[in-house]
Image: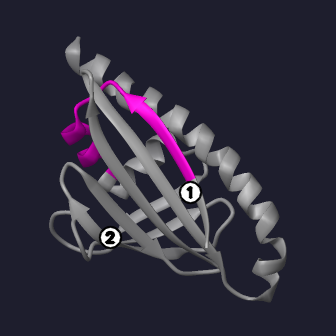
Amino acid sequence: MTVIESTTYIERSPEDVFDYLVDLRSELEWNPGVESMELLTDGQVGVGSRYLAKWKQSKHIEVECVAFDRPHHWSYVNGGPVSVTFTGHLTPEGTGTRLAATFDAEPNGLLMRLIFPVFIRIMRRQERENMVNLKRTLEGKAKRIAT
């Protein structure tokens, strides 16, 4: 597996950050690479929740929540050409929250193994950009709520 790690500080409480990020539909607001995100399961988001996701570079992929410990950490897994386990960890820091994210990826199939080094370089850049977008979006929401 190849791991991409990223972190950012968000001027919001761990509960706010967790509630926003654990529902993958919020990714439509901050990740320009997401084309669609549909919740397939009923009820509150938690372990076992499944989504049908479509990113610009992917086919439709099912994503499932496999860990949920509000407001500390959560994990999602998916299959497809690249199997991914995404885990978010939240730590209170000052008046906000430190988000540490890991993106563990493993290629499936010969073609994907061949192009995987290029894929990972692109994903590293996108993850850095995503952290900036996420911080801006969540902190912007806090400002709109405060006014």
Instruction: Indicate which label's residue lies in the foreground, 2 or 1.
Output: 2
Does 88 appear above or below 115?
above
Residue under label 2: 65
Does 60 appear above or below 45?
below
The numbered mark at residue 74 is: none
Quadrant of the rendered image containing residue 93:
top left
Q: What stretch is highlighted in magenta?
A: 5-21
| Side of 22 relative to 133 (left or right) | left
> Is 60 in front, or is 65?
65
Q: Residue at the far top: name it.
A: 147
Rendered location of residue 104, percent (x, y): 54, 66
Quadrant of the rendered image containing residue 121:
bottom right
> Is 6 in front, or is 15?
6
Q: What residue type is labelled 1?
A: Glu
Seen at 53% across and 45% down, the residue is 6
The numbered mark at residue 35 is: 1
